[in-house]
């Protein structure tokens, strides 16, 4: 009788462990791996500005010798913005007409909800992150350490488990930037 009970308990444990149930712990594991937390959040920083912007909203960035400006040859009161060597420490990429700049670190915080639908094969998972190590470029966007930012991801159940179906984006790491060294 004891042997039968032991086998039954072991079988239930194995069946329970191989369950495709999506719980908060599993969702956190999947999300953290997909987004490679902690990671660096980047912002679009345009490469032109008016003199008013340069003297006001960009004052702190200018005072730290991260950017300089020159009168633009385009029509209007615009100035071209350029990164200094110090400013390049925050640069992730330079797509058309703007810079992608490191604004802060993002650390996974918590799963805030899971909505399972469509025959338990699809889910929307809500979670949030905490901003840390906010840079001067993040402060320009009014970000600050301790900000909690909410996100949602879509997941689908495959034969090998749950996967995020959102488009994969580049996840920048601390090591990609000299400003975090």
Image (spheres, rainbow, N blue to C red):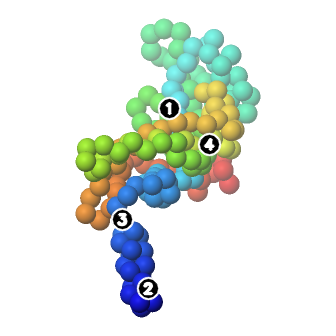
The 10 Å Cα crowd at callout 3, few under 14, some 14 to 19, many 20 or more, is few
Q: Secondary structure at mark 1?
A: strand
Q: CA distance from mark 1 to mark 4?
A: 20 Å
Q: Which residue is mark 2?
A: 6
Q: In terms of depth relative to the viewer, which is nearer, 113 or 100?
A: 113
Dot placed on the residue nearer the N-terminal end, 2 or 3? 2
Which sits earlier in the primary sequence, circle 1 or circle 4? 1
What residue does disc 4 label?
130
Residue contact between numbered discs 2 and 3, judged by CB atoms under 8 Å: no
Q: What is the number of the mark on residue 44?
A: 1
Q: Residue at x 60, y 24 (%)?
A: 69
Which residue is at the front of the view, 7 or 26?
7
The kind of secondary structure element at disc 2 is helix
| 89 left or right of 160 in image | right
Q: Percent position (x, y) of residue 5?
A: 42, 84
Looking at marks 4 and 2 on the same chain, the residue that comes earlier in the sequence is marked by 2
Q: Which callout, 1 or 4, points to the residue nearer the camera?
A: 4
Q: Identify the residue at image location x=63%, y=11%.
A: 52
* Sequence order check, earlier mark of 1 and 3: 3
Report the Cα–Cα distance between label 4 and label 2: 45 Å
Label 1: few (<14), some (14–19) or many (≥20) C-alpha neighbours in 10 Å: some
- Name the residue that disc number 3 marks: 19
């Amino acid at each position: 009788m004891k042997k039968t009970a032991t086998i039954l308990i072991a079988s239930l444990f194995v069946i329970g462990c191989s369950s495709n149930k999506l719980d908060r712990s599993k969702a956190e594991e999947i999300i953290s791996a997909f987004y490679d937390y902690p990671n660096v959040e980047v912002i679009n920083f345009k490469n032109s500005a008016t003199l008013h912007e340069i003297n006001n909203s960009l004052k702190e960035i200018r005072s730290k010798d991260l950017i300089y400006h020159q009168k633009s040859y385009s029509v209007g009161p615009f100035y071209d913005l350029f990164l200094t060597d110090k400013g390049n420490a925050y640069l992730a990429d330079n797509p058309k007409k703007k810079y992608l700049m490191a604004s802060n670190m993002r650390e996974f915080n918590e799963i805030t909800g899971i909505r399972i639908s469509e025959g338990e094969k699809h889910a929307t998972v809500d979670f949030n992150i905490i901003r840390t190590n906010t840079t001067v470029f993040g402060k320009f966007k009014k970000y600050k350490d301790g900000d909690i930012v909410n996100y949602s991801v879509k997941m689908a159940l495959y034969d090998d488990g749950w996967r995020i179906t959102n488009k994969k984006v580049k996840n920048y790491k601390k090591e990609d930037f000299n400003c975090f060294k």
